[in-house]
Image (tube, helix red, strand yellow):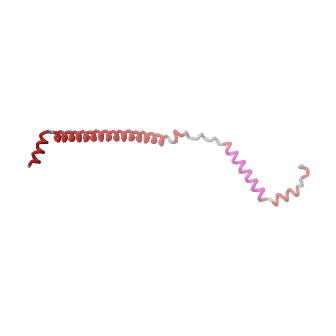
Amino acid sequence: MLTNIDVGKLSELLIKYKVQITALGCLFLLVLSFQLGRSSVDLPPPPVKEDFCSEYIDLNKILKKQIEDEKLSCKGRIDGAIDRERTSCDARVNETLQEHVKRNAIRNCRNARQLVKQCKGR
């Protein structure tokens, strides 16, 4: 096949497509130089996440601990408030029951009945 190529036609084609052939040659040289440069450079490994972000990781741990502590203290305050409310409610219920018992004692008392009869008689 190489023997059938006409050199004259090939030179005409090279002259006709001179810009395109020059661009392809430049592209080939660019790719070749990139690959050679890439293979000649030894890159260090990327940094470990713990080394790179250690400040943020430590800060995140501290903030998580603070949030947990605040949740526990808030729960303790809520439980304390509920206990105080229960004791005050129980005290009010007991006071009301004692008042009711006293009123019933007065109503059922014979002296109170006699006083009522006397008041009606006047």
Q: Which residue is drawn at 19% across and 42% down?
A: 103
What main secondary structure does the magenta stretch of the protein show?
Answer: helix
Residue furthest left in the image: 122
Q: Which of 18 and 68 is in front in this view?
A: 68
Magenta extent: 20-38
Q: Quadrant of residue 76?
A: top left
Name the residue at 59% across, 39% down: 45
Is residue 7 found left or right of 42 in the rendered image?
right
Residue 46 in the image, given as x and y percentages of width and height = 58, 41
Marks counted in the figure total 0
Q: Residue furthest right?
A: 4
**Residue plotted at (70% across, 46% down):** 35
Figure check: 28 above or below 49:
below
Which residue is at a point 52% across and 41% down the rendered structure image? 52
Q: Give yes or no for residue 54 being in the magenta stretch.
A: no
Q: Which of 5 and 61 lies nearest the eye of the viewer?
A: 61
Q: Give how far across and how far down residue 66 sits, in percent.
A: 40, 41
Residue positioned most to the bottom: 16
* Along the viewing direction, whichever of 32 and 91 lies nearer the viewer: 91
- Residue 113 vs residue 86: left or right? left
Residue 22 colored magenta? yes
Location of residue 20 in the rendering, given as x and y in whole percent from the top left corner? 77, 58
